Amino acid sequence: MSEPQPASGEPRRPPSRFDAIVIDLRRLRIDAGEVSFAEIAARIATQREADGHSPGAARVARSTVYDAFQTGRRRLSPELVREIVRALGGDEAEADAWRQRCLDVRRTGPRAHARPGEEHPVPRPSAPPRTPTRTTGPTPVPWVGPAEYVASADHAHALRAALVLVLLVACVGVNLFGGAVIIRQQIPLYLDMIGTAAAAFVLGPWHGAVVGLSTNVLAALLETPGSMLFALVNVTGALLWGYGIRRFASTIPRFLLLNVVVSLVCAIVAVPINVLLADGVADAGRAAFTGLVPNTGDVWTTLFSLLTPISLVDKLLSGAIGLLLARLVAPLLLRGGDPVPRLLERRGATTVRQQGAGDGRS
């Protein structure tokens, strides 16, 4: 077997007697659908909690799992390898076989470089992983060496980046389409933040902010320059939606409350912009509501009373439609190792969330 090559950007390490196990672990991970290291760590933590460990003791660092897949190691924990195999869908017998293989390497040294099926046979899983991220066909996947593994990972990252770009452009298009329909039909709503909500839910708050900003820049170029100022409203909604669905809105009632908060904050941000642009009345759609709002003599208070119900209905619709769109693309796992927000999970699917996951920053 040729000398394993380090991944791009990593220092070259001398060959290790554990390299054969590491390379086969990589192959097992590819067979399971290239499960992210963060998700493997989350599955291990879940297994440990089921075995009776406390949540704190059950946690395992993503870097610990990542290191187990690197060649040139001097040590490799048999117990960690066993847990990784379990997390990738292996049964108890297969996991024990991997653990025993690691123990044999410690005792016998160089002969551990043999591949599975030669001196240390490892049974292949007879059933698909319990928490698959991609369905694998019945044809066995050929053995993948280090160089091929790095190439396949690079291709996966490039494909994910391309899909993210396509989704961002599509979300901007959804925003522009919704705003155009509202203007043409003279409906007293906006519906120019549906794509912003969808991007914030799937990709994170800062991707949603990029969609919102791009929407208003294009609208300013194509229609009225004043639309640029309303980018503040769009970006505010993106940040609230993106962080809210990851930190707070884990149930439908909480999601509805999140949309109410978004509507109120966006109305507050929009009031000074409307005063600056049109003395408190920005278009004919809002003017239709002026008869329902008492004139207090204060343009700021009157305008806030005017915009609040419009914003409430608009954000509830935009959030709901954005959530439906986000659920359609959530299975693509475009954020790599980041956990999928609970409301984006498909019914009947099991997605393990990483213990103590990050805040969703893009």
Image (cartoon, rainbow, N blue to C red):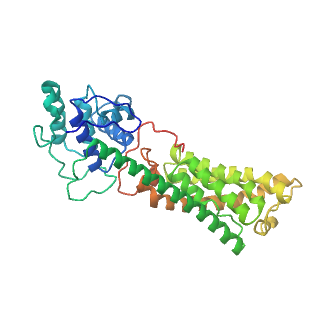
Check the image and name the residue furthest to the right. 297
Using residue 185 as the reference point, say whether residue 25 is left or right of it. left
Q: Which one is nearer the viewer's eye here, 156 or 224? A: 156
Using residue 234 as the reference point, say whether residue 32 is left or right of it. left
Q: Which one is nearer the viewer's eye here, 285 or 162? A: 162
Instruction: List x then y, in percent, for residue 306.
Output: 77, 59
**Is residue 345 in sight in this rendering?**
no
Q: Does residue 346 lie above or below 123 as drawn?
A: below
Q: Quadrant of the N terminus?
A: top left
Check the image and name the residue furthest to the front. 2
Q: Quadrant of the C terminus?
A: top right
Q: Does residue 178 lie above or below 357 as drawn?
A: below
Q: How many marks?
A: 0
**Is residue 11 in sight in this rendering?**
yes
Q: Residue at x 50, y 61 (%)?
A: 325
Q: Which one is nearer the viewer's eye here, 173 or 272? A: 173
Check the image and name the residue furthest to the left. 119
Instruction: List x then y, in percent, for residue 259.
Output: 60, 54
> In the rendered image, which quarter is residue 12 located in?
top left
Q: Does residue 291 lie above or below 23 as drawn?
A: below
Instruction: List x then y, in percent, for residue 139.
Output: 20, 58
Using residue 360 as the reference point, say whether residue 157 is left or right of it. left
Instruction: List x then y, in percent, for residue 55.
Output: 37, 32
Q: Residue at x 57, y 48 (%)?
A: 205
> In the rendered image, which quarter is residue 116 located in?
top left
